[in-house]
Amino acid sequence: MRVIGHRGCPVLAPENTLAAFDAAATRLDWVELDVRRCGSGELVVVHDETLDRVTGAPGRVAEATLAELQALTIGDSGESIPTLAAVFDALPDRVSVNVELKERGLVDDLAAVVGGAEHEILVSSFDAEALREVREATALPVAFLFAADWAESLSVAADLDCAAVHPHYDLLSSARVEEAHDCGFEVNAWTVPDREIVRRLRECGVDGVVVDDPALAE
């Protein structure tokens, strides 16, 4: 069972920062990150549409230039919001990357960043149309993220020719994992909060768990 460091594992360092990915890479073979476009056009690694939760600053990521974003710090860590390119440059080639798209219209720039990368890459999103853009323009494997509507979500994943599904862990049972496998999907559950649930999911046969703390899956 693969263990995927959610946003680089925020128990190790502030989420979606180079420090978090560096710390996760010493412990895990997979990391997950969030991608959206900033106001000057670059792809940046940040979860929220707005800046206040992670930086304390007002405003929206889509309205801030890269220079403005990188002048901010994540809490008191000294870390700033990185570009997607910087994260790929920093991660060892052996570390696989789950790139979660937070919006549509990113595929051309995504392909430009990851096209020459040696990392194994999986592109996920809650937005089926964002994944459709990836499927139509690249050979990158995709995974549909969802938190409800099991049967409908499997249908969406099939329509997108997904390699995997990423359901919320509460949706999963042995029967549902088997059903997803029978449909040809790997199953990576998010975001798993404790050891007991990790153990249960392992027994259900999931292929991977997304965690904030890598110690949960030891």
Image: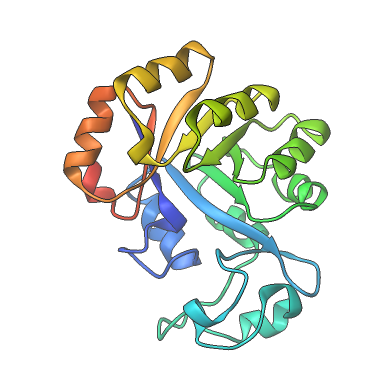
Q: Residue at x 57, y 56 (%)?
A: 34
Residue 109 image position (x, y, % from top left): 79, 52
Tell me which residue sits at (62%, 38%) in the image.
118
**Front position in the image: 106 or 26:** 106
Q: Quadrant of residue 37?
A: bottom right
Residue 190 higher or lower than 77, as above or below? above
* Residue occupying the far top of the picture: 182
User: In the rendered view, does 75 fall on the left or right side of 184?
Assistant: left
Can you give x and y, in whole percent of width and height, for residue 127 in the image? 66, 46
Q: Does the rendering let one see residue 28? A: yes
Where residue 7 appears, as percent x and y from the top left, is 46, 57
Quadrant for the N terminus, please: top left
Quarter of image, res 40 = bottom right
Residue that appears at 53% across and 28% down: 164
Q: Is residue 211 above or below residue 150?
A: below
Instruction: Please name the colour scheme applied to the rendered image.
Output: rainbow
* x then y, percent, for residue 144: 58, 36
